[in-house]
Image (cartoon, rainbow, N blue to C red):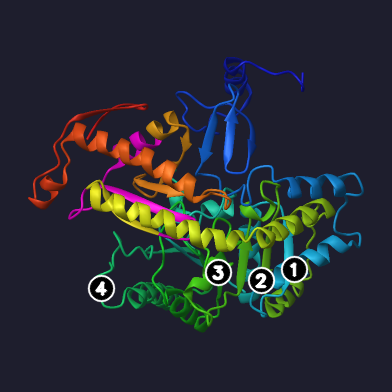
Amino acid sequence: MSAEKLAKAQTIHLRRKFIGPSCKIFFSDDPIKMVRARGQYMFDEKGQRYLDCINNVAHVGHCHPDVVSAGAQQMETLNTNSRFLHDNLVLYAQRLQATLPAQLSVFYFVNSGSEANDLALRLARQYSGCQGIITLDNAYHGHVTSLIEISPYKLHHLADAPLNPFVHVAPSPDVYRGKYKNDHPDPAKAYADEVRDIIRRVQSKGGKIAAFIAESLQSCGGQVIPPAGYFQQVAEHVREAGGLFIADEVQVGFGRVGSHFWAFQLQGDDFVPDIVTMGKPIGNGHPMSCVVTTREVAEAFMSSGNEYFNTFGGNPVSCAIGLAVLDVIAKEDLQGKALRVGGYLTSLLEKQKEKHPLIGDIRGRGLFVGVELVRDRAKLTPATAEAQEVIYRLKEQRVLLSADGPHRNVLKFKPPLCFSTDDADFMVDKMDAILTEIETATGLTTANILNGKDHVHKLMQTKEGTIHV
């Protein structure tokens, strides 16, 4: 049965029968059945090729032969747990450390971004001796219980979800539609002062803060780029209170931002987190992840008397794959490519913003880019239905893209780093035509925007049904 090839309808039937109903699927009304992939392309059961603009997991490209070969060779030699001495674990840790500030030198290897972030909380709480965590609004850090509690992106959607009294939510440092925008004289300080004020409120009630945790660039929150200097000021407030700064690089690490290997480095060379978590791109699709911290934090964790052991974390196969991913990034200059192609993509999108009133903001770094769609640039009215329409129409054009953010109106570009300028041209041409059709159908024109006219309300047919806009 394992080798049997099922018709698409059979696959859908069996998924509905055996897979949990809360496990959602892309394009649920007409899902794509993928059967193979290579580089930045995926292929369905009919052999139709799709340009993948979604997959930040296949970091160096789907099924990269060097990564596949490294895993296969190690698998046929030895795979065991990290209680046995093995070269791959220490060599991989050494290679990873070379990409990081010197203070971050002690590694714990685990299996997923969720597991990494959960362990980071344990480290911080052991070090500080308290439970309090500050997180950002719209943040997402993982699916286990400890992380749902600090992930407003998920928590807000859970009916009657209890609020953990040890969790405190600071405003997302969004300078486009957040509390302090680009026109604020110092948005970094203003947002950091919000964190300071939370700490003071907690302390006034006898509480303490173990850590502040943030994605270095918010992904599910809408591709939010924190203003420069924000992390440094937050870290100062948190450390003064006895807590640690945790940088979540699960979505954005390993050269995706182009100018730097890690996205937290965008804040400046003087900023060093106390803990960094990694996942998704680390194994190019292989389930592995990592936590790195300082010697001081690691020794405090050890002082608890509890041995830490992870059955699969840091096994020889995972580390061989991780080493191969680093080799490919260097050999193919994928960080440099992310900078060049990402810059080219952003320039194309900026030209689209001049043309299309639906585009309110273009933001990103390297090959991590967001396009926020709005119905009114002055009021920032989210164009949620339009964003979904763009996603579904691009799918019909064999381009895979997603939309996210608190209003589901931000188009997210996070493709494999082998994504090319030709791919960018192809995708933007398709998006251009789709936006033109939508704006024409709804009466949203540049002239209307400039004249201050309201968006014309029409019915818009989407693949999810008829939506009033």
Q: Which residues are magenta?
A: 364-391
Q: Position of residue 288 (x, y in %)?
A: 71, 52
| Residue located at (67% from left, 49% from top) | 284
Q: What x and y, as percent, mark residue 226?
A: 41, 67
- C-beta proximity under 8 Å, tags 1 and 4: no
Q: Secondary structure at mark 1?
A: helix
Q: Name the mark on residue 95.
A: 1
Give left or right: position of 428 versus 244. left
Dot 3 corresponds to which residue? Answer: 260
Mark 3 and mark 1 lie on one chain; the one further toward the N terminus is 1
Comes first in the chain, label 4 or label 3 = 4
**Residue at horizontal 59 percent and vertical 67 percent from the top:** 261
Kindly indicate whether the residue at mark 2 contacts the one at mark 1 (C-beta within 8 angstroms). Answer: yes
Q: Which residue is mark 2?
A: 99
- In space, the residues marked 2 and 4 are separated at their CA atoms by 34 Å
Q: Are marks 2 and 4 in contact (CB under 8 Å)?
A: no
Instruction: Residue type at mark 4: give it.
Output: His
Please give the residue where the numbered disc 4 appears in the rendered image. Answer: 184
Please report whichever mark, 3 or 2, sits nearer to the chain's N-terminal start: 2
Q: Is residue 367 magenta?
A: yes
